[in-house]
């Protein structure tokens, strides 16, 4: 019990430090006027959201005449909350939030689709590796997610339900990502969990656990989820998109340029452009983390044709809000801007 309290304290401290960063950033402009835009990212140092900081580092926002302020929260669900509250104009997080929000009466849409696979990995601790050989074994286990209501929480629930385990039969534990996830695994606060690179690379390097399911590639996504699963994206309130089309087009131009740049450069070249403190496990390990995750990214920001239907099927399998709701998938994303991006 003591070890669990310890990790909870670590997680709270991490969340508070990031909340402070958010609060500091929320005082300045960012309503789209004069090209000022605030974007909340569900973990700036996560490789799945790498295009956000990379676009800043490459100077592509500036090239479009934009003054973009990137803010960070430890989980995508918190980025969603900031967007809905009007604290920021855009969120970089998982596309699945657009469906979840639609049935709650909030209209948001993905305007640049960074990926066609989740980029997530289900890890099990060395201690639990013998007991958990597939999601069928989730029953009675404590499984780490970034936050309750986050996309890692959604996907974990789907994997369980799809394997005959009820969502009430296991315990999701909010442990964030990075060092808080690793500490939870070390201390036995969780038996396993869902996380992304660079956390995965660090866990493998430290030999703290094993990979149960790898969804960093379209193939891995299809095997685990039955199809392409568009995840990381830039999504925005539809009303804001419609009233700021020029600014949204500039954002799309910048992000598509970055996705194309990523597709023609090595993991080492990409890593070299990122802030030095993102490579917590060292430069080589960080480059390896990028290499493992690169297959998830699109090259043009366009939503994969079958993606929205896969996401709807996954969410409806366990989410009571969505189960019997009618979702208008055409309103959850737009390709208007990325198709015009050069």
Image (spheres, helix red, strand yellow):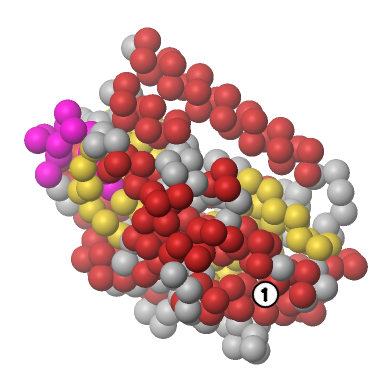
Which is the main secondary structure of the residues drawn in magenta? loop
Q: Residue at x 9, y 35 (%)?
A: 130
Q: Residue furthest left?
A: 130
Q: Nearer the viewer, residue 80 or 26?
A: 26
Q: Is residue 191 visible?
A: yes
Q: Is residue 324 visible?
A: no
Asked if 143 appears above or below 85 in the picture, the reply is: above
Residue beneath disc 1: 254
Location of residue 60 in the rendering, given as x and y in whole percent from the top left corner: 70, 72
Asked if 277 appears above or below 246 in the picture, the reply is: above
Asked if 65 appears above or below 318 in the picture, the reply is: below
Q: Nearer the viewer, residue 234 or 67?
A: 67
Q: Residue at x 74, y 77 (%)?
A: 250
Q: Is residue 124 left or right of residue 17?
A: left
The residues colored magenta run 122-133
Q: Quadrant of the C terminus?
A: bottom right
Q: Residue at x 26, y 56 (%)?
A: 214
Q: Is residue 59 left or right of residue 333?
A: right
Q: Secondary structure at mark 1?
A: helix
Q: Residue furthest top?
A: 2
Among the 4 quarters of the image, the one containing residue 124: top left
- Does the magenta-highlighted stretch encompass residue 303? no
Among the 4 quarters of the image, the one containing residue 185: top left
Location of residue 276 in the rendering, given as x and y in whole percent from the top left corner: 57, 48
């Amino acid at each position: 019990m003591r070890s669990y309290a310890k990790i909870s304290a670590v997680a709270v401290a991490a969340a508070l430090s990031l909340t402070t960063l958010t609060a500091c950033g929320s005082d300045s402009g960012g309503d789209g006027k004069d090209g000022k835009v605030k974007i909340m990212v569900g973990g700036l140092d996560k490789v799945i959201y790498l295009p956000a900081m990379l676009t800043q580092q490459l100077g592509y926002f500036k090239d479009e005449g934009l003054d973009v302020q990137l803010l960070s929260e430890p989980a995508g669900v918190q980025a969603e909350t900031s967007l809905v509250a009007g604290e920021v104009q855009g969120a970089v997080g998982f596309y699945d939030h657009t469906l979840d929000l639609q049935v709650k009466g909030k209209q948001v849409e993905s305007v640049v689709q960074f990926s066609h696979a989740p980029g997530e990995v289900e890890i099990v601790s060395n201690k639990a590796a013998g007991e958990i050989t597939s999601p069928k074994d989730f029953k009675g286990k404590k499984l780490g997610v970034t936050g309750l209501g986050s996309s890692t929480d959604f996907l974990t629930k789907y994997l369980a339900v799809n394997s005959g385990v009820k969502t009430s039969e296991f315990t999701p534990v909010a442990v964030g990502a990075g060092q808080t996830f690793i500490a939870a695994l070390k201390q036995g606060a969780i038996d396993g969990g869902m996380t992304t690179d660079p956390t995965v690379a660090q866990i493998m390097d430290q030999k703290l656990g094993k990979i149960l399911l790898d969804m960093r590639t379209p193939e891995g996504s299809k095997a685990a989820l039955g199809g392409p699963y568009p995840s990381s994206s830039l999504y925005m309130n539809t009303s804001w998109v419609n009233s700021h089309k020029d600014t949204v087009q500039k954002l799309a131009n910048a992000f598509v340029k970055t996705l194309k740049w990523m597709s023609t450069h090595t993991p080492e070249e990409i890593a070299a452009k990122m802030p030095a403190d993102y490579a917590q496990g060292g430069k080589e390990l960080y480059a390896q983390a990028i290499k493992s995750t690169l297959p998830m990214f699109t090259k043009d920001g366009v939503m994969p044709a079958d993606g929205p239907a896969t996401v709807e099927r996954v969410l409806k399998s366990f989410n009571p809000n969505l189960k019997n709701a009618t979702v208008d998938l055409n309103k959850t994303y737009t390709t208007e801007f990325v198709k015009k991006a050069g």
